[in-house]
Amino acid sequence: MDLPLIWSVLIAVSVMLYVILDGFDLGIGILTIFADDDAERNLMTATIEPVWDGNETWLVLGGGGLFAAFPLAYAIIMPAFYLPILIMLAALIFRGVAFEFRHKAVRRPTKHFWNGAFGIGSLTAAIAQGFILGGFIQGITVSGRDFAGGTFDWLTPFSVMVAGAVVIGYVLLGSCWLYLKTLGPLHDGSRKWARRSLIGVFLAMAAVSLATLSIDPRITARWGLTMTSVDFSKLIWLLPIPVFGGACMWGLMRDLRKVSGAPDWRPFLLAVGVFLSGYIGLAVSLFPNIVPFEVTVWEAAARDNALTFMLVGAVVMIPVILIYTAYVYSLFWGKVKPGDGYHG
């Protein structure tokens, strides 16, 4: 049994679940900045109130799994991204505090402050995650078994582009979630936000994909693509990934038409499909490296007895978390109406 491979899949799935689940509520947090008034803002936050804190469980699981299962990778990756990780965690904490305090604020200036803190905290967390992802994709400088780069290696034009793509992608997920969960003017407004952000996601994914191909020759070799030639014997096996993503975008644009007749749940599912295609494409580009392009999953893995011991716990706990998450979402399924939400 290939334990390092199993753990790399578990961590990758945990991170993907975090990106999707916390991605849509970060996207809604960003969209609250553009809400017309407090009533609309309260309705937006009511759609995520039962689930937003539970969505972050997967970030803990992914980070904890990396620390325990791949200690070498953790020891290299963390120093490379100390600053954006600290900014992300501070933004998530501040955002969580703001989510509670904005309901309790009485005076108008205080209410405006906490409303802004929730929106800006969501935006800051999304940008920081984009910088981490961009810096990770472009590679980390390693000497021996240690990080050997600079404090700001992650801050490059490529990582800025990826950060922008992450923000636009989260806005797309948040818009589609609002389309699923609301009625009336906010439902119509969320459709417009989703259509506009989908165009941005298309352009951002195309730009990031092309830029990623130029980062390392091993990526172009994996896909069989260069600026001057195409190796169809390699590309044909991976072509379903971008085709799937393109089909999801096409279907999403059709479903977001004013008279499409599509069920309200389908745009969110298609938006998840867009993210899934990009995530799988990235995994294919970087595998088997867990520290691009220096350390593989097998080189970074802990000893087999430790991986086996932790796997027993994961086999028990992950299904419990999944079942609980599914139960909470099913319990609060349905449209949110004015007056729903926080009553503490």
Image (spheres, helix red, strand yellow):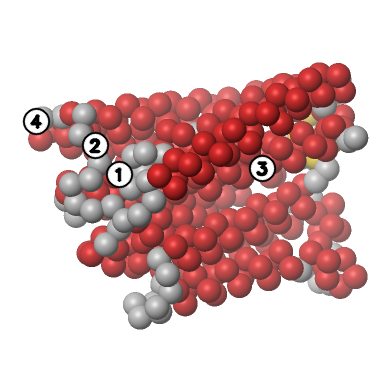
Residue of label 4: 107
Q: Earlier in the sequence, mark 2 or mark 3?
A: 3
**Residue drawn at 47 percent across, 77 percent down:** 254
**Rendered location of residue 145, percent (x, y):** 82, 22
Q: Earlier in the sequence, mark 3 or mark 4?
A: 3
Residue of label 2: 342
**Rendered location of residue 243, percent (x, y):** 68, 71
Q: Are marks 2 and 4 in contact (CB under 8 Å)?
A: no
Q: Could you give the CA–CA distance between mark 2 and mark 1, rounded to whole angstroms?
A: 9 Å
* Residue found at the far bottom of this picture: 259
Disc 2 secondary structure class: loop
**Residue drawn at 79 percent across, 20 percent down:** 309
Q: Could you give the CA–CA distance between mark 3 and mark 4, rounded to whole angstroms?
A: 43 Å
Depth check: 216 or 194 in front? Answer: 194
Q: Residues within 10 Å of mark 1 (few under 14, many from 20)?
A: many
Tag 3: amino acid? Val
Tag 4: amino acid? Arg
Q: Residues within 10 Å of mark 3 (few under 14, many from 20)?
A: some
> Which quarter of the picture shows residue 323?
top right
Residue of label 3: 13
> Which quarter of the picture shows residue 214?
bottom right
Depth check: 78 or 328 in front? Answer: 328
**Residue drawn at 32 percent across, 26 percent down:** 97
Q: Residues within 10 Å of mark 2 (few under 14, many from 20)?
A: some
**Residue drawn at 23 percent across, 53 percent down:** 337
Tag 1: amino acid? Thr
Residue of label 1: 45
Q: Are marks 2 and 1 in contact (CB under 8 Å)?
A: yes
**Rendered location of residue 166, percent (x, y):** 52, 50
Disc 4 secondary structure class: loop
Q: Could you give the CA–CA distance between mark 2 and mark 4, rounded to whole angstroms?
A: 18 Å
* For discs 3 and 4, the disc positioned in front in the rendered view: 3
